Image (spheres, rainbow, N blue to C red):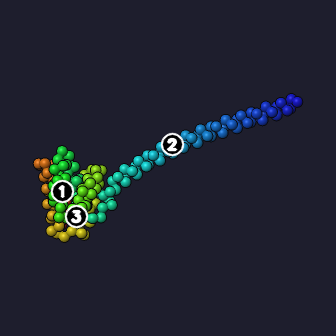
Amino acid sequence: MAFLGILVAALSGTVIWYWRFKMMREAGNEIIDSVERMRGAYRRGKRRKQAEAAPLASIADPAIAAVAFFFCLAKEKPMYLDAAKDVIRSRMKGIIRPGDMDEVLVFGEWASKNVNSPEDPIRRFRDLWLKALDMQERRQLIDIAEDVAAAGGERTKEQEHALQTLRRTLMN
C-alpha cells in the first residue's frame, strides 16, 4: 500500500508540475502574441504613413500634378490658402474640364497635405512635365505657380526657392 501511495503522490506531483509548465508556456505565448500584435500595429502605422504620402506617386496627368504642386506652394502661406485656391481655379479653367475642376482641386489639396516641401513635387513630377509639356506650357506652369505664390502678398523664402527650382528644372 505504501508503494501505491508513493506512486499516486509522484503521479499527482507530475500532473501538477506539468500543469504549471503548461500554464507558464501559455503565459509566455500570450506575451509573445502581444508583442507581435504591437509590432504589427507599428508596422501598419508606418505603412499607412507611407501610403498617405503615395498619392503624389499615383498622379500621371501633368495638369493634376500641377494642381498638387500649386497647393504645396500655397501651403507655405496657410492664411491665404483660400485666395491661392481661387487663383488656381481661375488659372486652370482652360486646362482642366469644368466638370472635373472641383474633383481635381479636392484631390490636389488632399495629395499635398503630407508633402513637407514644395520642392518634393518638382522632383517627383519633373520627368512627367518635361515629357508632356512643350516650352510654352512649361512657361504657363511657371506663371501660374508665380501667381499662386503671390496670392496674399509677398512670397515666402520657401516659395521663392521652390519657384527658382521649378524654373531651373523646366527651362534647362
Question: 60 above or below 86?
Answer: below
**Mark closer to the chain start, 3 or 2:** 2
Q: Which residue is mark 1?
A: 88
Horizontal side of residue 61 vs 8, given as left or right: left
**Number of residues whose C-alpha sits closer than 10 Å to that of mark 2, classed few (under 14), some (14–19) or many (20 or more):** few
Whether 157 is drawn above or below 67: the answer is: above
Q: Are marks 1 and 2 in contact (CB under 8 Å)?
A: no
Q: Amino acid at mark 3?
A: Arg
Distance, label 1 to label 2, CA atoms, is: 48 Å
The answer to whether the residue labelled 1 contacts the one labelled 3, judged by CB atoms less than 8 Å apart, is: no
- Mark earlier in primary sequence (1, 3): 1
Q: Residues within 10 Å of mark 1 (few under 14, many from 20)?
A: many
Seen at 15% across and 58% down, the residue is: 90
Between 169 and 23, the one nearer to me in the picture: 23
Amino acid identity at mark 1: Ile
Of callouts 1 and 2, which one flags the residue occurring earlier in the amino acid sequence?
2
Identify the mark at residue 97; answer none if there is no mark: 3
Looking at the rendered image, the disc whose residue lies closer to the viewer, 1 or 2, is 1
C-alpha span from label 3 to label 2 = 52 Å
Q: Quadrant of residue 125?
A: bottom left
Look at mark 2 in the image and give the residue it sits on. Answer: 35
Residue shown at the point (70%, 35%) measured from the top left: 17
Residues 98 and 80: in front is 98
Q: Is residue 4 visible?
A: yes
**Which residue is farthest front?**
99
The local crowd at label 3, few if under 14, some if 14 to 19, many if 20 or more residues have their Cα within 10 Å, is few
Figure disc tally: 3
